Amino acid sequence: MRATAEQGQKNRGICIVTAWACEQQLVLGQIKTDQKSNEKITIPALLEELDLQGALVSIDAIANKSAIAEQIVGG
């Protein structure tokens, strides 16, 4: 979600990590990041909630971590 913080305020906006199924055009899951966290912390939590067996997973470069890759392959 972009521009969710009030203009002129120093508070950051809402950050939500979403799992999206392109072919079905369906949101499989969403998790809001904690206020003092980021996507790198939230992505593994969302992956834990998904059944990844037989799935093709495409993920943003921010998740370019070996632990996340291992979690996807293990799923």
Image: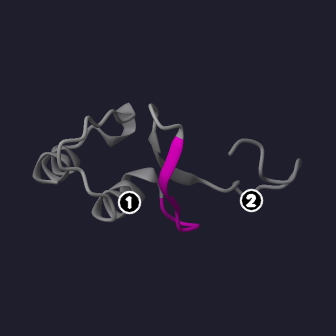
Residues at marks 2 and 1 touching, judged by CB atoms closer than 8 Å: no
Judge the density around disc 2: few (<14), some (14-19), many (≥20) Cα neighbours within 10 Å. few
| Residue 19: assigned label | none
Chain-order first, disc 2 or disc 1 = 2
- The correct choice, above or below, for 23 with respect to 52 in the image is above
Q: CA distance from mark 2 to mark 1?
A: 24 Å
**Along the line of sight, which residue is nearer the eye, 5 or 20?**
20
**Which quadrant: the N terminus?**
top right
Residue closest to the far front: 24
- Camera-side residue of 39 and 36: 39
**Residue at point 48% right, 62% down?**
37
The three-letter code of the residue at mark 2 reads Asn
**Magenta stretch: includes residue 29:** yes
Residue at left offset 44%, top offset 31%: 23
Q: Position of residue 20 (x, y in %)?
A: 47, 42
Residue annotated with mark 2:
11
Report crowding for label 1: few under 14, some 14 to 19, many 20 or more residues within 10 A (C-alpha). some
The residue to which callout 1 is attached is: 46
Side of 7 where 3 appears, left or right: left
Closer mark to the observer between disc 2 and disc 1: 1
> From which residue to which does the magenta span run?
26-37
Give percent across and percent down for residue 45: 35, 64
Q: Identify which amino acid the numbered label 1 is placed on.
A: Leu
- Horizontal placement of 53 versus 12: left or right? left
Tell me which residue sits at (18%, 49%) in the image. Answer: 53
* SS under mark 1: helix
Q: Is residue 75 magenta?
A: no
